[in-house]
Amino acid sequence: MNLAASRDVCSWAGFTLLEAVAGRRRHFYLHARRGMNAMVMAILHYMNRVTWQVEASVHTLTLHCAMDTTSRAGNHSITRGTRRIVDLERFGVVECEKHTDQKTGAIYFKSIVVTERFFDMIGMNVEEALRERDTAFGKWKNDQNLGLDISLSEMGKMSVTEYSSLRKQYVVAKAWSLRHDKKITKAQIRRAKRLAQKPKDELRRIIAEELFQKTSNSARDFSSAAISSFNRQVGQRMRYIYVLAVADDPPDDAPQPLN
């Protein structure tokens, strides 16, 4: 990382030699050069030394580089960061794969893997990078720190290629889980804003009915202590709805949200 920070990666000779392949005919202007240097540092920060996979989304990389923008209308954009990734992909410095939601067809994650050209661009010998990868892989296998749920016997027989494939599946699954949780959260916020507009008595009745329906017949208890506990839960959920109604994201210490 120190080696990459000490040089301007846009001065790499490969950008000139590969112009015909990449289809780019102009040099990077000043702000694009700064953005490219920042993006390379972000890639190095999130890169897995064994798999050479960048274990972060384009959105995270753009935020890391402070290249995201917000319009006057409040729309958030990561176009500046996306352009730098597209440039690197065009010159073969990274390889990208888009993962889409089968139901909606929307892209929820773009996996990024650096190639040997990436190390040449930052001024590192490719053979040295390969040796570093083999050393790190051997160390992680001995320390049982591969970050995957596999047995020790399978770990001993595993190659770098096999581990890279499994690690990629893990990263993509994690990205899908984060997207799924985010969608649920947005739905909860929209519902909370609708419920917060109702009178308090009606809101209390709606929440009480939902809680009562979720309780199984065998678990229903009509003692005074159980009723007091039930009323406290209703009050907690009412406060949570009012908090969500005025916030873009739920608080970290919020009670259980409505389904």
Image (cartoon, helix red, strand yellow):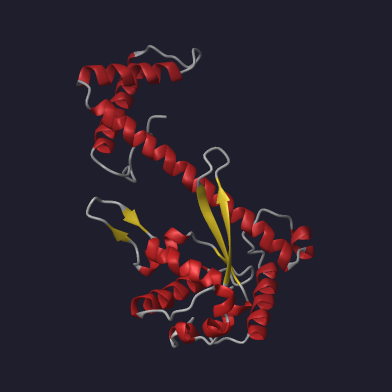
Percent across and percent down for residue 50 are: 64, 70
Above or below for 41 versus 237: below
Percent across and percent down for residue 87 are: 49, 71
**Residue 91 appears anywhere in the view:** no
Residue lying at 58% horizontally and 84% vertically, measured from the top left:
120
Q: In which quarter of the image is residue 48?
A: bottom right
Q: Is residue 234 left or right of residue 18?
A: left
Residue lying at 33% horizontally and 18% vertically, measured from the top left:
208
Q: In which quarter of the image is residue 214?
A: top left
Q: How many marks?
A: 0
Residue at the left extreme of this rendering? 199
Q: Is residue 84 left or right of residue 127?
A: left
Percent across and percent down for residue 211 are: 39, 21
Above or below for 54 versus 222: below
Residue placed most toward the observer, 126 or 89: 89
**Residue 170 appears anywhere in the view:** yes
Residue placed most toward the observer, 177 or 222: 177
Above or below for 196 versus 72: above
Percent across and percent down for residue 134 are: 69, 76
Above or below for 252 versus 209: below
Q: In which quarter of the image is residue 101?
A: top right
**Quadrant of the image containing the C terminus:** top left
Residue placed most toward the observer, 12 or 255: 12
Residue lying at 36% horizontally and 16% vertically, measured from the top left:
209
